[in-house]
Image (cartoon, helix red, strand yellow):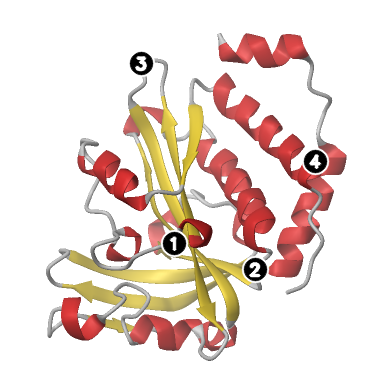
Amino acid sequence: MTAVVNPFRVSRILEVQDLAAAQKGIRVLLGFDFHQYVSITRLTPTKGSTFPNFRPDRSPIKPSEGYWIVGVDKNNEVALLNAVRLYDLSNSNLAEHLQSLKAFYADPARHAHPQDKCICTAPSARKITGNVAYDGDLWLRRDFRGQGLVKIVTAIKRRVTFAMWAPDFICALVERWTLDKAVYDVAQVAHSEPGGAMLHLIEEKISEDNWLIWRTGEELRSDLECQEESQPPITVQSFMAARR
């Protein structure tokens, strides 16, 4: 995808979203070192294992090809975690990448368990190709759920992802209950399809039957333009008040 990104527009949108998170008691931090990300996730109570595609010991990520988001509360304790990475699927597609287990392990022959498997039957997964941003490992602490933080962090991810890579697609694998309970609303999802991944990773203790959700690069660009037009002005007073 070819696109011209205006960094001032992106920074303004991030400022608005950062303000929205601050008003809910969360300070948002971005990072690029996935060794640091794993060290944070391992020390976070109630969070399950970090998926191997975001662990450098199983799937290394260059600083230019991935980032993570951590949200901390007023006590500087972790309340939100999420990660995004870029896959070059110019000569493949998402379905093949998942089923080969290369989405999860840089070297499946070395790191995957013999009984590991991923079955992807979503028809659209074979059309998702090129530069593909993969969004995963989302975790939100129980006391912050139901407050709109997923929507805020999704807006941040879309803008950061577009500014960094202008990908052809951004996608995620999610469990059906998250769609049923509107954890991701229609505006966030854009497209959804069952059969994204019937995933079993033995040593990771992961067994899920996920839907595929995705957005095209053109939809990301449109989001950026529409949200910029709809944002209210930010005043110094409102930003500082939210930071207190």
Few, some or many residues within 10 Å of mark 2 (<14, 14–19, 20+): many
Asked if labels 4 and 1 touch by Cβ distance under 8 angstroms, the answer is no
The dot on residue 44 is none
**Which is in the foreground here, disc 3 or disc 4?**
4
Residue closer to the observer: 151 or 201? 201
Asked if labels 2 and 3 touch by Cβ distance under 8 angstroms, the answer is no
Q: Quadrant of the C terminus?
A: top right
Is residue 76 at least partly visible in the picture?
yes
The kind of residue tagged 3 is Asn
* Mark earlier in primary sequence (1, 4): 4
Residue closer to the observer: 147 or 154? 154
Position of residue 235 measured from the top left corner of the image (x, y, whole percent): 79, 16
Q: Residue placed at 30% from the left, 50% from the top?
A: 35
**Which is in the foreground here, disc 2 or disc 1?**
1
Under circle 4, the secondary element is helix
Please tell me whether residue 101 is drawn above or below residue 215 in the rendered image: below
Few, some or many residues within 10 Å of mark 1 (<14, 14–19, 20+): some
Q: Residue placed at 58% from the left, 83% from the top?
A: 129
Asked if labels 4 and 3 touch by Cβ distance under 8 angstroms, the answer is no
* Mark earlier in primary sequence (1, 3): 1
Q: Residue placed at 15% from the left, 64% from the top?
A: 205
Give the residue at mark 1.
62
| Label 4, label 2: how far apart the Cα atoms are | 19 Å
Give the residue at mark 4.
8
Q: Residue placed at 48% from the left, 34% from the top?
A: 29
The kind of residue tagged 1 is Lys
Few, some or many residues within 10 Å of mark 4 (<14, 14–19, 20+): few
* Mark earlier in primary sequence (4, 2): 4
| Label 3, label 4: how far apart the Cα atoms are | 31 Å
The dot on residue 75 is 3
